[in-house]
Amino acid sequence: MGTQVKDVVIKPEAPNTLLLDKHADYIAAYGSKKDDYEYTLSEYLRMSGIYWGLTVMDLMGQLSRMNREEIIEFIKSCQHDCGGISASTGHDPHLLYTLSAVQILSLYDSINVIDVDKVVDYVKGLQQEDGSFAGDKWGEIDTRFSFCAVATLALLGKLDVINMDKAVGFVLSCMNFDGGFGCRPGSESHAGQIYCCTGFLSITGQLHQVNADLLGWWLCERQLPSGGLNGRPEKLPDVCYSWWVLASLKIIGRIHWIDKAKLRSFILACQDEETGGFADRPGDMVSSLWNLSHTILHMHIYFACDFSRTCHSLYRAYHSLRYILASVIYFHPGGSFPHSVWCGWSVFAGR
Amino acid sequence: MHGRVKVKSTAQQEEEKRKEREKKLKAFVSARDAVLRKRSAGEHDEEALQLTQQLLSSNPDFATLWNYRREVLLQLETSREKDEVQKLYESELHFIEACLKVNPKSYGCWHHRSWVNTRLPQPDWTRELGLCDRCLSLDERNFHCWDYRRVVVKESGVSVEQELQFTDRLIGSNFSNYSSWHYRSTLLPQLHPQPAPDSIHSHRVCEEQLLKEYELAHNAFFTDPNDQSAWFYYRWLLGRGVCVCSLCLSQAQSEGLMLVLDGQPQQVEWRSTHPRLRHSPVWLCDLPPGSVSDISNEHNLTVHWTEKYTHRDCALYTGCAESWCRDSATDQELFRSELSVEKSSVLQAELQSCNQLLELEPQNKWCLLTIILLMRALDPLGHEKETLAHFQTLKEVDPMRSSYYSDLCSKFLIENTILKMEYAEVRVFSLSNKNLTTLCHLDQLLLVTHINLSSNQLLRLPPQFAMLQCLEVLEADDNAIESLEGLYHLPKLEEVSLRNNRILFAIQSKCFIRNPFSAFRASAWFDLVSRSQYSSLINSYRLCRIMEGQQI
């Protein structure tokens, strides 16, 4: 009797070291393949894709390989009259891509190339009566958007424009029996939503409302025998969940409840030795930017020592990556780090 | 792009694939460009619907196309009669259903369906419920569908009872049924609420129903001891509902506290014990100078917590330097809820059954953990020894979560020590050599004068440690303490012993981050830095033993 645990098996020949150069090359080349099928089909999330790529390159000290001017011009062309920003030219504005754009511009210290006041108005205008946030004018409600809203405003220093009490109240109303959070009140707990809600509560100074012990348990139970993490019970492990789950654990101060070594070997096994990038689980097709950025970020979050628990730091970290890079180098076992990353570090060492 | 297995292929197969993709790409690009051109030209017609239909069928995440489609539909509405509008949107529902067959997890699809129902003159909720049933029978974990179902149920007035029965059916027939248990957890408090003290909407279930739920969950994990969903649900059933942080105030709300001395309200400033604790269960204020200097008289103090309409009184008797009023941890049901006779006997029986299950499945971690939780609910002090033994087994059968079990065990040991301290009516807290990995409930140690945490595995004295405002003696030798954040303005602290810890390690690692080359210089350099950190510690206390044995 008994259900089999849904999991994967890692083959002995799977990669077990971090192939940083391959990943950097993969991303640097990604944008140039504009006639690539997957690239074109993912246009609807281009702004986020750029953000993920840039973050990873910055973490690896290779941000200069990306075309800053081109990206900034692109963002300018994506701001609409209402203030919101779209994923790409010709697409409609949405909170998701407004956040990504603000994150990119923060990374590049160029926030004023867009109309910041209008962005703030756009975000504020999406808050509903019950404190929730719609993603855009078409009204889809989701705690993801609560997170996007406060993260955007926090980066712009304008958290005070929204009704904070109601915003917090709505997110808390999405807390479930297991300590987790879902999309809307009554929705099932899911690692991605948990990341958004704990991130939200951290930014808004309300982490004490989370039952950290209960939620931490649910989160650490995401780790499967293979070492990988799933997003909710009875699901397969997926490398992107390393990010959602791990970041959530870090925010609530329970990151040590995951077996670090086993997770690390799972993630390394997800690498594609030929093309660079990470698949969602060992043996699958590379899911490019999504997994790569989340994986690298997660690994750095895990080993970071100068991190405070708040998402604020996480956000400062996104565009102030020296701390992370330094921490990685300090904690990387054996010190067998690719030369390029070490060179990158020496540039930052002066700070 | 998730979940596609990578398969190696021949050069010819590669070439064929490449040609195929190029063809697909061209088709997509031309359709996309045509659509966006039409939209820029402001055309909201049937052709727009056709073009977007073609693209959305295989690209349902292309959100802008759904937006365009909605604009077109709204435009068409204005020139049609009600029954035509009904047909228009009904055919839209057919289209969405086709999209959902291809991609049942597209946010865009589900949201569009919800939107269509707000435009339909006569929505058919029975049909929508049927769609949900079909969708869930294919994938019981599809949260998009569950969320949509909740909307349908609300709009159509399906009863909570009916939905509860729906979960009964699903739980009975399926293994991967976490979504159903979750739904149940939201339905039960609506149908059988536990009356709450204030009129807050209760998230707890009344006892009668609760006892039935134990049986339901119990049957599930006895049928399949690896059905983790039932174990998660069971833990919720065993827990207490109200967040213990009912005493937490935030800095902004400290005006909610009012102090009255001998009948006179006092102007005082409330502060937290540590700058990092902005939301705290412990608040301090200084009495106005001279207000209680006359110890030859009795003084009466009252603290009002205006937000919760409650207060506490305390009398400072003649000749006494200190006084207190405290709710006991037992009375407050801080660590476990009060048990009725009925509930107690049910939980006893549950404990027995779980022990029987453990004999059949000695490696089952869910069972082990649940036994621990049951023992804590019934008799935390009486079961202490068994609890520790079970935690040891847990760490062996589920090593990935050893840190979790260590922390949880530490928490339970601290709770027990607090209870023992209360019964003995002493102000000494001693938990040495107990494999403690974390500290908690520090707000309950406010009155403690002596604390012994030696020979454990503590990594830090966290900011919350600053709540030990009466502490005079701290012994925490032989741990792995790196951070002393909590040793902050403890007004009565005189003796500190922190030998054999890792205080130097933390200082050293901070130095290294700032300047990686420091590792290659003489250790004299960081000696200098660390000594200055030490000197402030050493100077603070009458007796301070920290220099010896710090590990690097």
Image: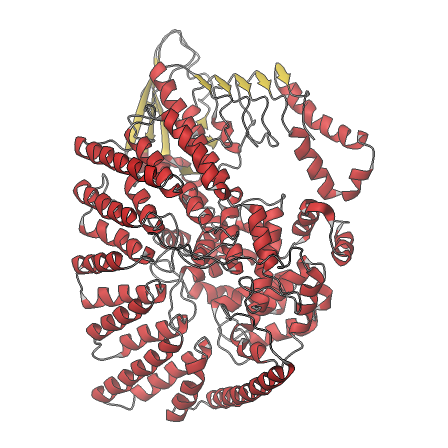
Q: Is residue B166 left or right of residue B432?
A: left
Q: Is residue B394 above or below residue B145?
A: above
Q: How many marks do you count on the picture?
A: 0
Quadrant of residue B85 within the rendered picture: bottom left
Residue A292: x %, y % from top left: 60, 63
Q: Residue B64 or A281: which is nearer the viewer?
A: A281
Q: Nearer the viewer, residue A218 or B19?
A: B19
- Colouring of the image: secondary structure
Q: Quadrant of the C terminus of chain B?
A: top right
* Position in image of residue A181 (x %, y %): 39, 53
B133, B65: nearer the viewer: B133
Asked whether the viewer can see residue B47, the reply is yes
In-front residue for pair B304/B65 = B65
Q: In the displayed structure, does residue B472 sit left or right of residue B298?
A: right
Q: Is residue B422 above or below residue A197?
A: above
Q: Quadrant of residue A156?
A: bottom right
Residue B263 image offset from top left, x and y in percent:
31, 21
Q: Residue at x 67, y 62 (%)?
A: A57
Residue B151: horizontal and vertical position, in percent? Answer: 27, 66
Q: Can the viewer see residue A115?
A: no
Give the residue displayed 43% in from the left and 70% down from the top.
Answer: A136
